[in-house]
Amino acid sequence: MSTAAQVIRVQPGEGPAYSAVGDVYRILATGAQTGGAYTLCEARVLPGGGPPPHIHHREDESFFVIQGEITFQLGGEKVVAKAGSFIQGPRGIPHAFKNESSAPARMLIHVVPPGFENFLADVATPVPSFDSPPTPVTPADIQKLLAVAPGYGIEILPPPH
């Protein structure tokens, strides 16, 4: 991996796209492209979508909602983030997000240090484009997530009751 940052240009519709846990992600900047500084991706979260509660033990994760509304659970606090909202989730804090509205939402996800792009490549299903529908979540997908996540320092938590 090069340690030199590069000029990065990603046009609409470009960038590797993945479907994971009912959401669609596209990679905008990888750790290799940013000289090991960060990963940046865009997420499209359909109504009812969002990952299970989890903890990143290695990374800080920031979210900027660019369309719609996302409800975040951060360390026991519930925050409804509308377009234009910024949320910072430091490593070690249990968190989850969910689109509880009736309209799709989009957000940028900034991860420091990088590596989230590798996690997506290992657990998610590649899709043709960011506009592709998410693939159905199967029991095998959940088992794969539970098996792969610990290797990336991600702890999947049981859903709240």
Image (tube, rainbow, N blue to C red):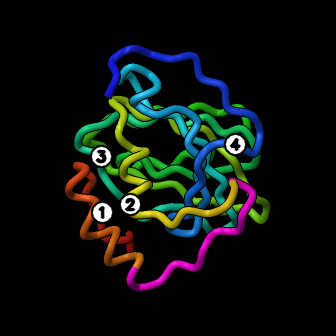
> Tag 3: Cα neighbours inside 10 Å, few (<14), some, or many (≥20)?
many
Using the numbered discs, state the Cα–Cα distance from disc 3 to disc 1 in whole angstroms.
9 Å
Using the numbered discs, state the Cα–Cα distance from disc 2 to disc 3 in whole angstroms.
10 Å
Report the mark closest to the observer, 4 or 1: 4
Residue 86 image position (x, y, % from top left): 58, 31
Q: Is residue 15 above or below residue 154?
A: above
Which residue is rendered at x = 74% and y = 34% of the image? 11
Indicate which disc residue 53 carries: 2
Q: Amino acid at mark 4?
A: Glu
Q: Earlier in the sequence, mark 3 or mark 1?
A: 3
**Helix, strand, or loop for circle 3?**
strand
In the image, which residues are magenta? 130-140
Which residue is rendered at x = 38% and y = 22% of the image? 37
Residue under pointer 1: 156
**Helix, strand, or loop for circle 2?**
loop
Residue under pointer 4: 14
Q: Amino acid at mark 1?
A: Ile
- In this view, the residue in front, 82 or 123, is 123
Q: Amino acid at mark 2?
A: Pro
Residue under pointer 3: 56
Q: Earlier in the sequence, mark 2 or mark 4?
A: 4
Using the numbered discs, state the Cα–Cα distance from disc 3 to disc 4 in whole angstroms.
27 Å
- In this view, the residue in front, 43 or 89, is 43
Q: Earlier in the sequence, mark 2 or mark 1?
A: 2
Which of the 4 quarters of the picture holds residue 100? bottom right
Using the numbered discs, state the Cα–Cα distance from disc 4 to disc 1 in whole angstroms.
30 Å
> Tag 2: Cα neighbours inside 10 Å, few (<14), some, or many (≥20)?
some
**Helix, strand, or loop for circle 4?**
loop
